[in-house]
Amino acid sequence: MRLIILGAGGYGKTVADVARQSGKYEQIYFLDDGQQTSDLILGTCSEYMKFADGNTEMYPAFGNNEMRLDWMKKLSDAQIVLPRLIHATAYVSPTAEVGAGTVVLPLAIINTDCRIQSGCIINCGSIVDHGCVIEEGVHISPGTVIKAENRIPRATKIEAGEVVPLRAYPL
């Protein structure tokens, strides 16, 4: 299996690291519009269809939530599989759901009965407590705590270290 990551910046490298540690991918490459200085960069993001095949998954590694969601739609419309990447040190409850194109980084916790929709970033050491709904494209920054029974709206960014009180965003 091959993974092509759109965007070779810091977040793209982080995604590659999680993917590499998963052991699922034999090859990991990038497409990037700015950097062309590495053998791992195959071309620009707009060339993605040249690399689409049944053995390739693609992930848009853009910190801009709307841009990531736009690229997810393009890739999905082209019937390209979007991976769900969960670091081995993260905890995801067996009753939680994690959508396609979501990345869960080291030491994150997704607790009981949570629904994490597609295209989310659940960053290092963040906690999503029981019964939360994280809508598509949300970025939960490092060290964030989302207390129980919150619905975080689409494409929201919760900043590092923030604590979202119980039911602050009602379900």
Image (cartoon, grey):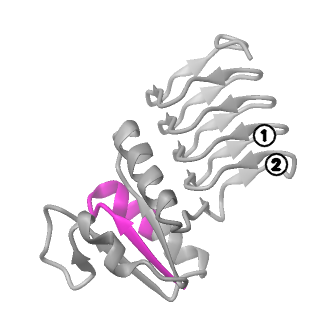
- Label 1 element class: loop
Q: Amino acid at mark 1?
A: Asn
Query: Which quadrant of the figure contains the C terminus?
Result: top right
- Relative horizontal placement of residue 93, taking residue 32 as reference (left or right): right
Q: Which residues are magenta?
A: 1-16
Residue name at image x 73 percent, y 52 percent: 91
CB under 8 Å between callouts 1 and 2? yes
Toward the viewer: 127 or 56? 56
Q: Assign a secondary structure to mark 2.
A: loop
> What is the number of the mark on residue 111?
1
For the question of whether residue 92 can be seen, the reply is yes
Give the residue at x 80% y 29%. 131
Q: For this view, does 130 lie left or right of residue 63?
A: right
Name the kind of residue labelled 2 in the image. Answer: Ser
| Image spot of residue 157 (x, y percent) | 45, 29
Quadrant of the image occupied by residue 134: top right
Q: CA distance from mark 1 to mark 2?
A: 5 Å
The residue to which callout 2 is attached is 93
